[in-house]
Amino acid sequence: MAEEQQYILGTDSTELERLGFQHRVWSQDAAALWSRANIQQGMKVLDLGAGPGFATFDLAEIVGETGSVTAIDISKSYVEYGNNQSKIRGFKNVNFLERQVHNLQLDYEEYDIIYCRWVLSWVEDVDSVIAESCRLLKPGGALLVQEYAQWGTFRIIPETPSIRTVIEACRESWRLMPSEIDIAPRLPEMFINGGLTIEHKGVLEKVSAPGQLVWQWPATFLHIYAEKLIEMGLLTEIKSTEFKNTWPILEANPSAMIVTPLMMEFIARKA
Ligand SMILES: C[S@@+](CC[C@H](N)C(=O)[O-])C[C@H]1O[C@@H](n2cnc3c(N)ncnc32)[C@H](O)[C@@H]1O
């Protein structure tokens, strides 16, 4: 399917579940950014690359019935899931549209807030996506972004050879993508070119130990992505098995730590 070629992690039910879990781990950071940008009842929000809509529905609760959230995703299955959830949960102000972030076909100066998290690392021509987002914002509106800044800061401690092999294979897969995983540092220039003023910039990073919720996030990602790395020819079955056998030993180690990949967040506002 076209969407699966576009988005390296796929859009199956395992990925849907992983995105739900990922949102739980990072939802407080998302909420803090929304609050800092002063998202209020009645606002019109655009969620770019919304996936199945875990952030979308939180945003819909904030803007309430007098506001609305339009969620864009390239994946037909996520859009169907989102619209279905919207019906089941009784949201009348949420609409999922199957669109490319490059071809939004939306009216200019319509949105108070555009939110975009973990999307720009997977798309080409980010400059045009940001330029179009700037045009879609109302005067006074803000673009809110949370994206990877330096994936190479991801550390698992102690780093055994089998763990290092899997992390290296992930990094190789990012290098092979036509897009740029560490996109965040390039964004401020694009915001300024689009006529936005950067109101806030920050970094997001977590350190976790076995048993903590945050620990499960990279752990789940690596176990799922190892299968994709095998399909891509970047990891052998033997190395993947070695990695999986190492995991319980790592989790039993009281000094084990995971440092999550460095992300950056921005609020960029239109005059
Ligand atoms: C890692 S998920 C993040 C989902 C959501 N933003 C979140 O924070 O939970 C990336 C999403 O971007 C979508 N995506 C990737 N490339 C896209 C494109 N060119 N246009 C629209 N959506 C895209 C994928 O289908 C996927 O749902």
Image (cartoon, helix red, strand yellow):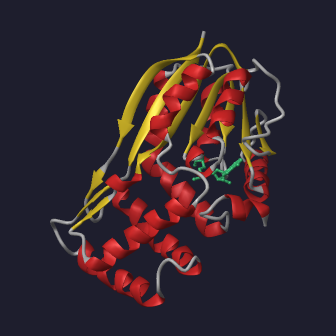
For the point 76% across and 59% down, which residue is it? Answer: 77
Residue 88 position within the rendered picture, expressed as x and y whole percent measured from the top left: 75, 50
Q: Is residue 84 above or below residue 72?
A: below
Residue 44 position within the rendered picture, expressed as x and y whole percent measured from the top left: 71, 24
Task: Report whether 120 appears left or right of 90.
Answer: left
For the point 77% across and 43% down, which residue is it? Answer: 96
Q: Is residue 66 visible?
A: no
Q: State which quarter of the image contains the N terminus.
A: bottom right
Question: 89 or 45, which is in the foreground?
Answer: 45
Residue 21 position within the rendered picture, expressed as x and y whole percent measured from the top left: 50, 57
Q: Is residue 237 visible?
A: yes
Q: State which quarter of the image contains the C terminus.
A: top right
Q: Is residue 24 above or below residue 12?
A: above
Which quarter of the picture shows residue 68?
top right
Q: Is residue 188 above or below residue 161?
A: above
For the point 61% across and 55% down, which residue is it? Answer: 178
Which quarter of the picture shows residue 116?
top right
- For this orientation, the residue located farthest to the bottom is 238
For the point 56% across and 74% down, which residue is it? Answer: 228
Question: 150 or 24, which is in the foreground?
Answer: 150
Residue 127 position within the rendered picture, expressed as x and y whole percent measured from the top left: 63, 35
Task: Report whether 45 appears left or right of 220.
Answer: right
